[in-house]
Image (cartoon, rainbow, N blue to C red):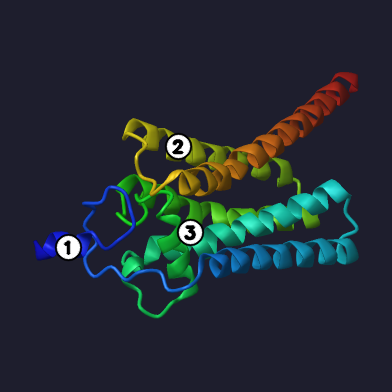
Amino acid sequence: MAGESEAARHPYIPTDLKLPEYVPISLPVSTILSVYLLSSLFVTFLVWTLSGRLTKRAKIERLLMCWWIFTGLTHMVLEGYFVFSPEFYKDKTSFYLAEVWKEYSKGDSRYAARESGIVSIEGLTSVLEGPACILAAYAIATEKSYSYILQFAISLGQLYGTFVYYITALLDGDNFSSGPIYYYSYFVVANSFWILIPSLIATRCWKKICIAMSTESHMKTKVP
């Protein structure tokens, strides 16, 4: 009975999820969300400002640089912490990143449970896609020849990871949320940006690559 009482203290679904030594969230939700929002806006503003002063790139490319830096840091810092901190739910120090994942697990308890598929997806994302996103921003700023193919590859990786994330949840019953507000705000809306934006970027890069290949082929046909 003592074990059941201990397990019931966490707010996650299923209620019988075993999280020994679970420590409740200590930071207010408003603080957790506002810190993330403000830090994201700061990074975006900084990249936008620097890209305008240093690179003189087109607005669309400056926006892309903002996205790649933002999503790259999100992958490496936020998701990287989750991957390499398997007992974040035991944190007693109110460490911000631990609090983020305690809160997010209300929308998807597979994170608190350390479900192997989730850890695998997040591990690859933080270790491979995170640095690649930073490289993509650098490639845009310096007009590297591999810029479009790199952005296309990362976008496909993000789409693949997000679809696997959703599909595995559906196949496992889609019952990992503590309530509708957490389900739609965290699980659905928050992750949907990694479907919408990568789709737009992949489409743009595909068109750019096709135009470049068509132009090269056309030029070759003119060579006597």
Point out residue 135 in the picture as x, y percentages from the top left corner: 66, 56
In this rendering, the label closer to the viewer, 3 or 1 = 1
The tag on residue 5 is 1
Tag 3: amino acid: Glu
Relative to 98, does residue 122 appear above or below in the rendering?
above
| Location of the C terminus (image quadrant) | top right
Comes first in the chain, label 2 or label 1: 1
Q: CA distance from mark 3 to mark 1?
A: 30 Å
At 57% from the left edge and 59% from the top edge, which residue is drawn? 74
At 60% from the left edge and 62% from the top edge, which residue is drawn? 73
Secondary element at tag 3:
helix
Considering every residue shown, the one lying at the far left of the view is 1
At 65% from the left edge and 38% from the top edge, which residue is drawn? 196
Q: Check disc 3 and report the residue beneath it.
A: 79
Q: Check disc 2 and report the residue beneath it.
A: 166
Residue 220: quadrant of the picture:
top right
Q: CA distance from mark 2 to mark 3?
A: 17 Å
Comes first in the chain, label 2 or label 3: 3
